[in-house]
Image: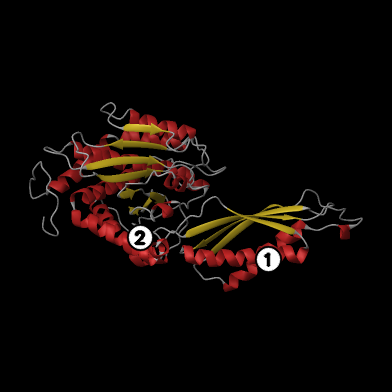
Amino acid sequence: MRPGEERPVEGGACDGVSELELLKLRAAERIDEAAERLGALSRAIWSKPELAYQEHHAHGVLTRFFECEPPAASWTVQPHYQLATAFRAEWEPPGVPAVPRPLHLGFLCEYDALPDIGHACGHNLIAEVGAAAALGVKGALEGLRGPPPPVKVTVLGTPAEEDGGGKIDLIEAGAFKNLDVVFMAHPSQENAAYLPDVAEHDMTVKYHGKASHAAAYPWEGVNALDAAVLAYSNLSVLRQQMKPTWRVHGIIKNGGVKPNIIPSYSELIYYFRAPSMRELAVLTKKAEDCFKAAALSTGCTVEIKGGAHDYYNVLPNKCLWKAYIENGEKLGIEFISEDAVLNGSSGSTDFGNVSFVVPGIHPYFYIGSEALNHTEQYTEAAGSQEAQFYTLRTAKALAMTALDVIFKPELLEGIREDFKLKLQEEEFLNRAE
């Protein structure tokens, strides 16, 4: 096969439309055919929000969706895969030989919610996008005449993105082993093939002092609340020397029990974010010094505990997101400019960790509302009928991009090369050696 050629697709072309473009049309048609079921899936998750690692209802809804997907038993479904609320569903065309190893594509679903405000980050739509894109690819490949391409499609249900990092648990359990490319998409206020989601580390800080009567003999006490306030102030003062791309935000979770008792215990929770893991380590060291200084000045003891997992920054894959933009524009998606991408605000996600072990794409998509994520207004938008058009359009773009990966060897080679180069830039390959 000469450079730039597509893998042959049997089934013919018509009216100047290539075989691959016909497959993409079939993928979009398959998603439209399943629109009612996909919308019901999303609404079922949205209507019963569940917190991280507790998504039992959503897990059941999703596993039943794939178990019942026609034709019967076409998906091999593993409920409670590695985690109580994770799952794995796999499909491959009949007759695919085991050797050579099939190209293995993964579609990721999230479905945890936020405390009090439910699906204010639209994870019900993330689950729908992942399921819909996988159905689209399957539907396109089922329509092929002749030998099917050596490919396997896997849908991974990944719980606990908002708190804990379920994808990191699954990485450690080997769930991403042998996946070649992964796909997912996240609701937002605009369409972007990539946003520079940053690395994140969280800390719980506990100060221990000594209780005493605050009026009769306060000098006998050691005030843990004073330590918490000083720590908060130390970090506020530090902000002047922080890089513009660093973020620090926290709360005082516990500050005492009664005004006339010198607080013997206080607790803070902080999140720290930076564009890379290297910068994050610098920022967290400065923060730890602030916490320790507050303990020293008040006479308290301090416990500093990091979260179970750090979230890595998301590695961009230009070959992959350029293919996604090309397909999305054919569907009428209007993307923000590359300057807006690089200078825009962003959060953190455990998909960042995934992007360090397998090439992938994590685009953002408009859902018909200007509401901001993590607000009650966004919860309402994520459950609206209007969001369905944009969600399924995004799923079609993902499915079409996956078909490009399957049938364009040059694209797959470029994706893998981008992945290696980005890892080298992050110094992970050198560190591993």
Q: Secondary structure at mark 1?
A: helix
Q: Secondary structure at mark 2?
A: loop
Q: Residue at x 43, y 53 (%)?
A: 353
| Residue 339 image position (x, y, % from top left) | 36, 67
Disc 1 residue crowd, few under 14, some 14–19, many 20+, Cα 10 Å: few
In the rendered structure, the answer to whether residue 22 lies left or right of residue 328 reads left
Looking at numbered disc 1 in the image, what kind of residue is underneath it? Ser
Q: Residue at x 64, y 66 (%)?
A: 289
Which quadrant would the N terminus be assigned to in this image? bottom left
Which quadrant would the C terminus be assigned to in this image? bottom left
| Residue 409 image position (x, y, % from top left) | 19, 54
| Residue 182 image position (x, y, % from top left) | 33, 49
| Residue 126 image position (x, y, % from top left) | 39, 44
Q: Residue at x 76, y 57 (%)?
A: 224
Which mark lies nearer to you, 2 or 1? 2
* Front in this rendered view, residue 394 or 10: 10
Question: Label 1, on which residue?
Answer: 233
| Res 7 seen here | yes
Question: What separation in Å lies between label 2 and label 1 (alpha carbons)?
Answer: 36 Å
Looking at numbered disc 2 in the image, what kind of residue is underneath it? Pro
Mark 2 / mark 1, whichever is N-terminal: 1
Question: Label 2, on which residue?
Answer: 316
Disc 2 and disc 1 in contact, CB within 8 angstroms: no
Report the residue that reaches farthest toward the top.
72
In the rendered structure, the answer to whether residue 75 lies left or right of residue 125 reads left
Q: Residue at x 26, y 41 (%)?
A: 152
